[in-house]
Image (cartoon, helix red, strand yellow):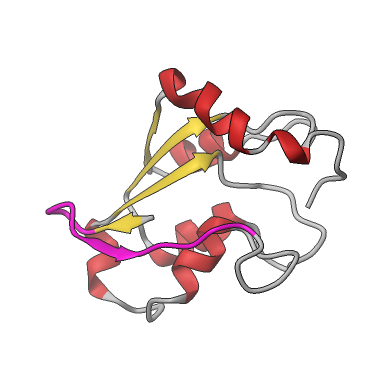
Amino acid sequence: MIVDEHGNELSRGYSRETDDHVHAEESALSKLPANDPRLKRATLYSSLEPCTKRRSRPRTCTQLILEAGIPRVVIAWKEPPTFVIDAHGAEALAAAGITVITLPELAEAARSVNAHLVGRPGS
């Protein structure tokens, strides 16, 4: 979900919403114009750390977030090695100046709704 600086929802998306390879961040961002000025003050909320490696698309979710200019990302669960080995989306975003907040108290809830994905190959 992407919200403006007042907490109003701008967009939301979920993995596999439009095809088998779309990620939640990608889906939410695709519903807004790339040059939407609200993105420069927005917060993106995601249950899972944005990807930094991707086989199914030319750009990762981390790249899409950086291109959109979103200054703040809140995640519940760091990318487990089940999906991608050596993921570092939070670190890559932070290194680019994005404020990244991890809410570990929500990690178990994020894991539980993704339990069906354990053992599936990466994206």
In this view, the residue farthest toward the top is 105
10 sits to left or right of 107 = left
Q: How many marks?
A: 0
Task: Examine the rendered structure and indicate whether residue 60 appears above or below residue 73.
Answer: below
Within the image, what quadrant is residue 81 found in? top right
Overall secondary structure of the magenta section: loop
9 sits to left or right of 44 = left
Residue 77: in magenta span: no
Residue that appears at 86% across and 35% down: 119
Residue that appears at 38% across and 81% down: 33
Residue stretch rendered in magenta on the structure: 4-15
11 and 68: which is toward the camera:
11
Q: Residue 4's spot in the image, x, y percent?
A: 21, 59
In this view, the residue farthest toward the left is 6
Task: Examine the rendered structure and indicate whether residue 101 appears above or below residue 31.
Answer: above
36 and 9: which is toward the camera:
9
Residue that appears at 75% across and 55% down: 54
Task: Examine the rendered structure and indicate whether residue 50 appears above or below residue 23.
Answer: above
Residue that appears at 75% across and 39% down: 116
Q: Residue 47's spot in the image, x, y percent?
A: 50, 40
Q: Residue 66's spot in the image, x, y percent?
A: 46, 57
